[in-house]
């Protein structure tokens, strides 16, 4: 795939570029700030943009704002953002447009090369890749929220893996459940979260967003 990088840490940026090249991918651009990222992404049209959330000059949310703008302007380009810490509000802003071609990983996860590459592939394929720690913290914070509190422990577990961006088949494999059991649990989740009848919107995406909104 063709990848563009925006990361202010030279060491991490060059390391990612080398890793991607070794895996057979093409790094079409690598930047230390987010100022020109949107324009360069429009010009180069990469398959995926890998973007650090906090970048110069203020090191607040420059990268996130660029990632959101790329999602709006170039819906066919995947966006994988990297963060030092779990930022619940940032995750909500990133996923507000839906959970297709999007990823949110903690930087510690990048050190796990196979997990990083798997997340990149899932975003490139049109899916989502949300860091398990991000999902875990969202689940903990949402434990007392209504209607999330109405979910059973198993339903919450299934929803947690769904929120990481996995398909029903992958959820079944990870939780050692049958595919029919996963479908049953997800149907219960959609019913309890009152996500039926939302014309034009996927209940799967809305279920993930409900976590972020709680």
Image (cartoon, rainbow, N blue to C red):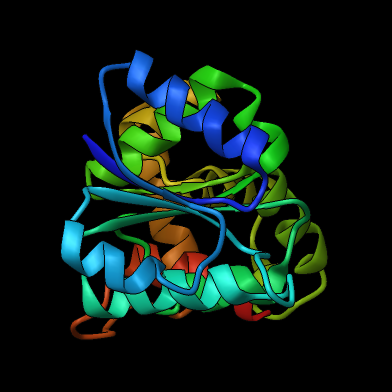
- What residue is rendered at 24% in x and 79% in y? 73
Taking the image as shown, residue 200 lies to the left or right of residue 169, namely left
- What residue is rendered at 57% in x and 51% in y? 7
Residue 154 placement: quadrant: top right
Residue 14 placement: quadrant: top right
Question: Is 52 situated above or below 16?
Answer: below
Taking the image as shown, residue 96 lies to the left or right of residue 150, namely left
Residue 31 horizontal/vertical position (percent): 47, 53
Residue 20 horizontal/vertical position (percent): 38, 25
- What residue is rendered at 17% in x and 57% in y? 45
Question: Can I make out residue 73 in this image?
Answer: yes
Residue 110 horizontal/vertical position (percent): 61, 32
Taking the image as shown, residue 85 lies to the left or right of residue 131, namely right
Which quadrant, please, contains the N terminus? top left
Question: Can I make out residue 193 in this image?
Answer: no
Out of 11 and 1, give the one closest to the viewer: 11
Out of 139 and 191, give the one closest to the viewer: 139
- What residue is rendered at 44% in x and 36% in y? 119
């Amino acid at each position: 795939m063709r990848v563009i990088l925006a990361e202010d840490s030279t060491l991490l940026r060059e390391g990612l570029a080398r890793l991607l090249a070794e895996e057979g991918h093409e790094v079409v651009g690598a930047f230390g700030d987010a100022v020109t990222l949107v324009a360069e992404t429009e010009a180069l049209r990469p398959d995926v943009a890998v973007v650090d959330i906090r970048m110069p000059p203020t090191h607040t949310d420059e990268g996130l704002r660029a990632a959101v703008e790329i999602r709006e302007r170039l819906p066919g380009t995947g966006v994988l953002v990297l963060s030092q810490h779990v930022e619940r509000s940032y995750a909500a802003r990133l996923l507000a447009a839906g959970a297709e071609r999007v990823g949110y990983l903690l930087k510690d996860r990048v050190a796990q090369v196979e997990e990083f590459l798997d997340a990149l592939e899932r975003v490139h394929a049109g899916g989502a890749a949300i860091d398990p720690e991000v999902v875990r913290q969202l689940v903990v914070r949402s434990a007392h929220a209504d209607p999330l509190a109405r979910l059973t422990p198993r339903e919450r577990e299934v929803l947690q893996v769904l929120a990481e961006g996995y398909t029903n088949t992958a959820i079944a494999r990870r939780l050692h459940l049958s595919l029919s059991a996963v479908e049953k649990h997800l149907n219960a989740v959609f019913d309890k979260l009152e996500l039926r009848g939302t014309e034009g919107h996927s209940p799967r995406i809305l279920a993930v967003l409900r976590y972020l909104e709680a």
